Amino acid sequence: LWGKVSNGSVLVFLSLPSHFGMMQNTSTNDLKRLLEQQIDKAGVMLLCNDALNYESIAHDLWELAKTGKQPVAWRALWVLDHATRESIEVLMDKQKEILALLLHETHEGSRRQLFNILLRYSIDTTTVEMLLEAVLGWLKNPKEGIAIRANAVRFLYKVCVLEPNFSAELKEVLQMQLHNAASGGLTNVLQKTISKLDKLN
């Protein structure tokens, strides 16, 4: 049967052992071959549906993500990012692995997707201890991607919910970043978070 992926501006078809949406018997190698293609948003959403319906698909996508081999890894994470928006159960038992991978990932797309996924889960003191220094560094680094810096702000707010005593210090950090923000999107996230911090106190 056939699954549609995009190849540049031309739509091509990739032979698969089963149809999108009915992929419970698909092997990891089948998924790898699919993700080696330039898959489009429609293909991602169909794979997302498979990940939500079949635990084996979600598992194999995560295994491909962990390899770090691009572009397969970030495309697998792209699918899992969408899947976890629908249900955090998809990677519920992978939070420690997500955290460890995020700390060591260098590919910008993969880092962004990993951070998106991590933010959907609750955090504990262990997560804070492992990530806090790195996240503060990402936020303060003007060369860091805007999406990573915005996610850093969101993570730090979650830290304040867990540890309210950190709120005053974080507010000072965010206000400093607000003066130097070069992006309207980041400015908006900073302003909203500062307002939310005021309500925590």
Image (cartoon, helix red, strand yellow):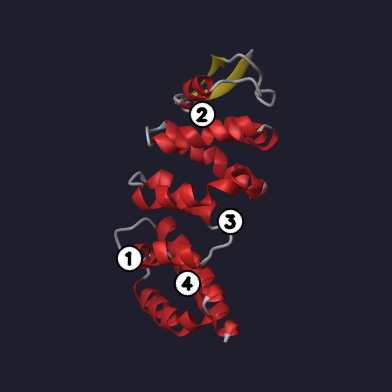
Marker disc for residue 120: 3
Q: Nearer the viewer, residue 67 or 141?
A: 67
> Which one is nearer the viewer's eye here, 69 or 172?
69
- Kindly identify which residue carries mark 1: 137
Give the labeled residue for mark 2: 39
Instruction: Find the distance from the CA under tag 3 to the CA under tag 2.
Output: 25 Å
Q: Residue furthest bottom?
A: 201
Q: Which mark is residue 36?
A: none
Which one is in front in this view, the residue at disc 3 or the one at disc 2?
3
Query: Where is residue 26 drawn, in percent x and y?
Result: 60, 20
In space, the residues marked 3 and 4 are separated at their CA atoms by 19 Å
Relative to 41, residue 156 above or below: below
Give x and y (percent) for residue 16: 58, 15
The residue pinned by badge 4 equals 190
Which residue is drawn at the image coordinates 43% and 38% (left, top)? 66
Query: First in sequence: mark 1 or mark 3?
Result: 3
- Looking at the image, residue 144 sits to the left or right of residue 157; the answer is left
Q: Determine whether, in the image, residue 53 is placed left or right of residue 40.
A: right
Instruction: Please report contact status of discs 3 and 2: CB closer than 8 Å, yes or no.
Output: no
Dot 1 or dot 4: first in sequence order is 1
Dot 2 falls on a residue whose secondary structure is loop
Q: Is residue 115 visible?
A: yes
The answer to which image quadrant residue 13 occupies is: top right
Three-letter code, disc 3: Arg
What's the CA distance linking mark 2 and mark 1?
33 Å
